[in-house]
């Protein structure tokens, strides 16, 4: 599973200690239903889900290979996917600023 949000990924790994109820309920559900270690980071420009949030026409969406097939590296074996070991070592500054 992939996300382009380092904050959300750090939450799934339990690096933040307290959340507001809405975030807490979502995080605990994700932790119960998935193995947090199976979540990986994908850069926004490589995230197919990010395409539809950008301004583009239906015709452009139909022609967009990444939307239909994912980033090119998904065709490679897992050990060749982007690494993200250093992303989740502690609560991020962004998370502290959001006061979540």
Image: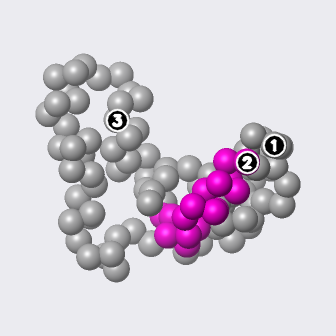
Return the disc, 3 or 1, that comes first in the chain's sequence.
1
- Residue 57 spot, x, y in % from top left: 24, 19
95 with respect to 85 (left or right): right
Q: Magenta part of the protein: which range?
A: 25-40
The verdict on residue 29 being magenta is: yes
Residue at mark 2 to residue at mark 3: CA–CA distance = 28 Å
Q: Which of marks 2 and 3 is in front?
A: 2
Q: Is mark 2 on a helix, strand or loop?
A: helix
Mark identifier at residue 51: 3
Quarter holding the C terminus is top right
**Residue at 17% across / 30% down in the picture?**
62
Q: How far apart are marks 1 and 2 (CA)?
A: 6 Å
- Mark 1 near mark 2, Cβ–Cβ under 8 Å? yes
Tell me if mark 2 has few (under 14), some (14-19) or many (20+) residues whose alpha carbon lies within 10 angstroms of its own: few
Q: Residue 21 carries which label?
A: 1
| Residue at figure coordinates x 26%, y 76% from the top left | 77
Q: Mark 2 points at which residue?
A: 25
Compared across the picture, whether 29 is left or right of 41 comes to right
């Amino acid at each position: 599973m992939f996300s382009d949000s380092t904050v959300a990924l750090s939450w799934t790994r339990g690096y933040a200690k307290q959340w507001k109820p809405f975030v807490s309920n979502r995080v605990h559900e994700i932790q119960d239903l998935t193995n947090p270690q199976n979540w990986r980071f994908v850069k926004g420009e490589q995230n197919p889900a990010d395409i539809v949030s950008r301004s583009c026409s239906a015709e452009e969406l139909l022609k967009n290979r990444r939307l239909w097939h994912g980033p090119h590296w998904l065709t490679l074996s897992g050990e060749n996917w982007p690494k993200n070991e250093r992303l989740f070592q502690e609560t991020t500054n962004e998370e502290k600023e959001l006061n979540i």
